[in-house]
Amino acid sequence: MGYEPLVNQNPLRVLNLGRGSKQLGLVMARAGLGKTALLVQIALDSILRGNRVIHVSIGESIEKTKAWYDDILQFILQEHSVSRPHELIDMIARHRMIMTFKEDTFSRPRLEERLNDLILQDIFRPNCLVVDGFDFGRADRSTVEDIKEFLESMNLQAWFSATSHRTDNRVSPAGVPAPCHEVDDLFDTVILLKPEKDATIQLEIIRNNGIDSDAGIGLNLDPSTMMIKEG
Amino acid sequence: MKQDLDRVRNIGISAHIDSGKTTLTERILYYTQRIHAIHEVRGKDGVGATMDSMELEKERGITIQSAATFCNWKDHDINIIDTPGHVDFTVEVERALRVLDGAILILCSVGGVQSQSITVDRQMTRYNVPRIAFINKCDRTGANPARVVQQLRDKLNLNAVMIQIPIGLESDMEGVVDLITMKAIYFDGDQGDQLRFEEIPAELQDEAEEKREELLDAASMFSDELMEAMLEEQEVTEEMVHAAIRKGTLSLELAPVMLGSAYKNKGIQPLLDAVNMYLPCPTDVENIALDLDNDETEIPVSNNPDDDLVALAFKLEDGRYGQLTYIRTYQGVIRKGETIINTRTGKKLKVGRLVRLHADEMEEIEEAGSGDIVALFGVDCASGDTFCGGKLNWSMSSMHVPEPVISLAIRPVDNKAQGNMSKALNRFTKEDPTFKTFVDHETNETIVSGMGELHLEVYIERMKREYGAEVEIGAPQVAYRETITRHADFNYTHKKQTGGSGQFGRVGGYMEPFEEGEYEFVDEIVGGVIPREYIPSCDKGFQASMKKGTLIGAAITGIKMVINDGSFHAVDSSDMAFQQAAKGAFREGYAKAGPIIMEPIMKVAVEGPSEFQGAVMGSLNQRRGMIVGTFEEGNYTVVEAEMPLSEMFGYSTTLRSLTQGKAEFTMEFSSYKQVPKSVAEDLIKAYQDEKKEG
Ligand SMILES: Nc1nc2c(ncn2[C@@H]2O[C@H](COP(=O)(O)OP(=O)(O)O)[C@@H](O)[C@H]2O)c(=O)[nH]1
Ligand SMILES: [Mg+2]
C-alpha cells in the first residue's frame, strides 16, 4: 500500500506485539512520557493490519484525542513520503472511532451498551480497543477482572494505559509498578516507558504474550511520535 | 488627538437562541441612560427592542445582524457588537469576533450550555476573545446556576468561577451576593435602577464564604500578591482580587461567572461594572495587519492615534438610516473631510459623514480615534475591506472565505420584483462574501448560493421584506465539484475551414491535480510555437472549461494546466481559434485524468440524552455519515460525525421524531470529499437523463 515508513518504524510491528486477538496489554509510564502517543501507534499498527479500532479516552475531549492522531500523522508524513497521503488519512479516520467519557461516566456496563449499539446496527465493528485515562488507582481488582472478562467475551484485543508515580515505590513480583502492581497478572503484555538521558524514550517489555522477559529487551523511541529512532 | 484607550470596551454578547441576548442588550442600553423606556421583546406596544432593528429577526427570534451600538457606563465607552449566533453565518460571526476585544457569554439558567453556545464559544477561543459568563433567567422555574457552571467547565473547558451567588432562585430570586465585596445587592424600583447594598443574609453566609474561597483560590493563580496575602493570612483587598480576575480573564485562563435575570432587571449593573473591570481595552489585545507591499508580512497594529490610519470595514448595513459601513479603527484617526484609501481596490475616497450609533439616535462626529467603532455614510465598499490613510498599504482581512456548499434557483414573481431582486442581491453579496449569485446561462435562472439552508432562507426573506422582492424558489441543490486524480497529457488541434478564413490552433501540454488552490496556469512554451498574444487565449479557454465538468456539469477545481507545445497558422490562427483549441485540449486531457465528483462534507454534532445515542448514531450511519467520536457525561452525550450535506436535508425532522425533540444538532462546513462510487453513478445518470430531456 506504500505505507512502509509507518510500518517499519512502528515499535509494535518491530517487536511483533499486538497480534493475539484477545490479548490484553498494558502501557505504563509516569505522566507526560508519551503513553497516549504509544496507544496511537498501537492503534495505527492495528489499523494498518486491516483492523478497526476504538480509541476510548477517559477525561479527554474528542477534539484533543483526534488531534493526537492528526499531529502524529502529520509528523510522520513530514519525515517520510507516502504515495497518497489523503487516502491514508481518510482510511485511518474510517477505521477508527473515538469514544470519550467524563471520568465517572465510564464503566463496564456503559462500555458494553455502547459497543452493542455499534455492533448490532452494524455501524462499527471493532477488533481492537485502546483505553487511555483509566484510573487504576481507584479501581479494585474485581473491576479490572470484570472488564477483562467482558473484552474476552467480545473477542477484542485491548490496550490500557496507566500512570505510575515517582513517589510510589510499590512493584509487583514481575516488576510492574503501582498502581497496577496488584492486577498486572491480568495482562498478557506489559510495556514500560522510561526517559533516557539523550531525551529519547526507552521502551521496556516486562511481559510479552504471557511470558515474562528478562530486563533488557528494549527499543529507543522518538518522544514526539513514539516511533523507533532511526540510525 | 488625546485618547484614553483604557476606557474603551468593544464587546460582543453571544448566546444560544432565546437565552435573552436581546433582552439583556435592551437593559444595558437602558441603564446606560440612552433609551428611556424598556420595550419588551416581541412586546405589544409594537416598538420592539432597539437592537433588533430587523423585522425578520423579530419574527424568528434570532439575531442575525451585527450592528454596533455605542453606550457609556461609568466613564467607559462601550461599543456593543451584535454577534450572530448561528454557524450558517460563519463569515459574519468571524468578522464580528475580529473587531471585538471581549465578550459576555449569556446562558440560560435552565437550558445551560446548548449547542450554539458550544459553537460560538469554540470560535471565541479561536479568536482569543476573553469572556465573562452571565447566567440569565435565574427567575425561571428550574433555574440551576451551579449546574450551568459545571457545564461551562465540562463542555466548554472554561475555568469558570462564580464571583456572585444568587439570593433566592426561581420566583424567589431577589438579588445577588458579590463575593468580592461580600455584600448583598438588591435591585429596587420598577426598572431595578436603584441598587441597595446590604449585609449577606444569614442563611447564605456559609455558602458565600465557601464560594469566596473557591474564587480566591482560582484568582490567586494569576497574582503573586494575592497568593501571598492568602498564605500569610493578611488582608485581601478588593483591588487585589479584581486585578487577579482581570489578569486571568485576559489570558483566557479564567472565566468569571455572574448571574441575574434580564427580564426582572436583576444583576445588570454589576455585569456592566465587570465589563469595565475585567474585559480588555483595545491596547490589551494584539491585532495583526498584513503589509500588502511586503508579501503580506504580518505586522501588529500600533493603536497609536498619531500613526497612519488603519481601519477595517466589518459590516455593511442598509437600515433605517440608509447605507452604513461600520468600521473599526486599529491605529490613527479617521476625520471627516479627509481622504482615505481602500487598500483592496486602491480607490481613494473622501470621508463624508462620520457617525456613532446610539441605541435611539445617530450622532454626527468629527473624528474617531484608534480602537473605536463608528460608521461611514454612503461609502461604496465590501465588507472586509481595509482603509488606510495614504502612507500605508495594509490589510486587516486575511480571513479565508469558504466556497458556498448549497445553492438554489430563484425566480422573481413579476417585473417589479425583478428589479428589486437585483438591487437586493447586489447589496447582499457585498455584505457577505459567502453569499454568491450568478445566472445559469443554460436555464436562464438566477442562482444564489451560500453556507447552509438557513443562510439562504434568511436572505430570501430579507429580499422580500427590505426590498419588496418576492421570489419563487427551487429546491436546494448541493454544490458538487469535479476534479482530477492523475496526470494526463493533451495535444489537440482545432481546425475549421468554413468558406473564407479558417480557424487553426494546436495546444499541447498536460494537466495534473493541484492541491494548493483551485486553478493554476503555467506557460512553458518555448520558441514561440504558440505566439505570445495567444497564450492568454489558452488560459481563457481552460478557465471556461473549468466552469462545467463533463461528469455532472459541476464546477471543476484543483487543476494545474501546463502548456509546452503547439502550433499556429499565420492567417487562420486567432484568439477565438486558440480558445477553442484549449477547450478541446482540456476535454481530451480531462477524460484521461481520472475525473471524480466531490461533495461538501459537514461537521455535525448531535447532542442530547444518552438513551438516544444508539438511535442517533444509527440515523447518521444510514445517511452515509462517518462517526468521528462520542462524548459522554452523566446522562448526556454528544455524537460528532462527518456527514455529506446532500444527506442532511430534513434531518432536523428525523432527529426530532427519533428523540422526542430532546436532541439537537449543529452543522458546519468541513471539506470537500470524493463521493462513493454508487452515488457517483447515480449522479452521472441523473445528469445524462437531464441533458437528454433538456
Ligand atoms: N423568565 C425570564 N425570561 C427572560 C429573561 N430574559 C429574557 N427572557 C425571555 O426569553 C425570551 C427570549 O429572549 P430574547 O431576549 O429575545 O433572547 P435572544 O433570542 O437571546 O435575543 C423572551 O420571551 C424574553 O422575554 C429572564 O431573565 N427571565
Ligand atoms: Mg434576539
Image: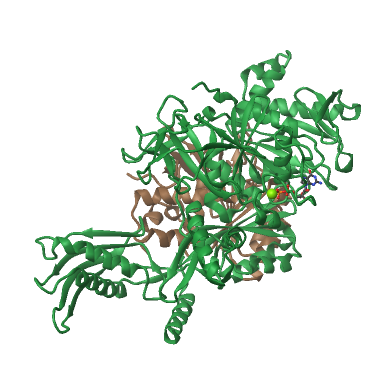
Chain colours: A brown, B green
Q: Position of residue A131 (x, y in %)?
A: 60, 51
- Residue at 55% over, 25% down: B5
Q: Is residue A91 above or below residue B274?
A: below
* Closest to the observer, B693 or B462: B462
| Residue farthest toward the bottom in the current orientation of the protein | B693
**Does residue B405 appear in the picture of this structure?**
no
Total number of numbered labels? 0
* Closest to the observer, A190 or B230: B230
B19 or A190: which is nearer to us?
B19
B168 or B604: nearer the eye?
B168
Query: Where is residue A128 shown, x and y percent of the image?
Result: 56, 60
Q: Residue at x 40, y 56 (%)?
A: A7
Q: Does residue B470 appear in the picture of this structure?
A: yes
Residue B223 placement (x, y as % from top left): 62, 21
Question: In the figure, residue B299 lies in which quadrant?
Answer: top left
Q: Where B222 sits versus A207, above or below?
A: above
Image position of A208 with respect to B350: above or below:
below
User: Could you tell whether A104 is left or right of B291 in the image?
Assistant: right
Residue B136 location (% of width, % of height): 76, 42
In the image: residue B422, left or right of residue A62: left
In the image, taking residue B87 as reference, residue B239 lies left or right, namely: right
* Quadrant of image for the C terminus of chain B: bottom left
Q: Quadrant of residue B193?
A: top right
Q: Is residue B145 above or below residue A189?
A: above
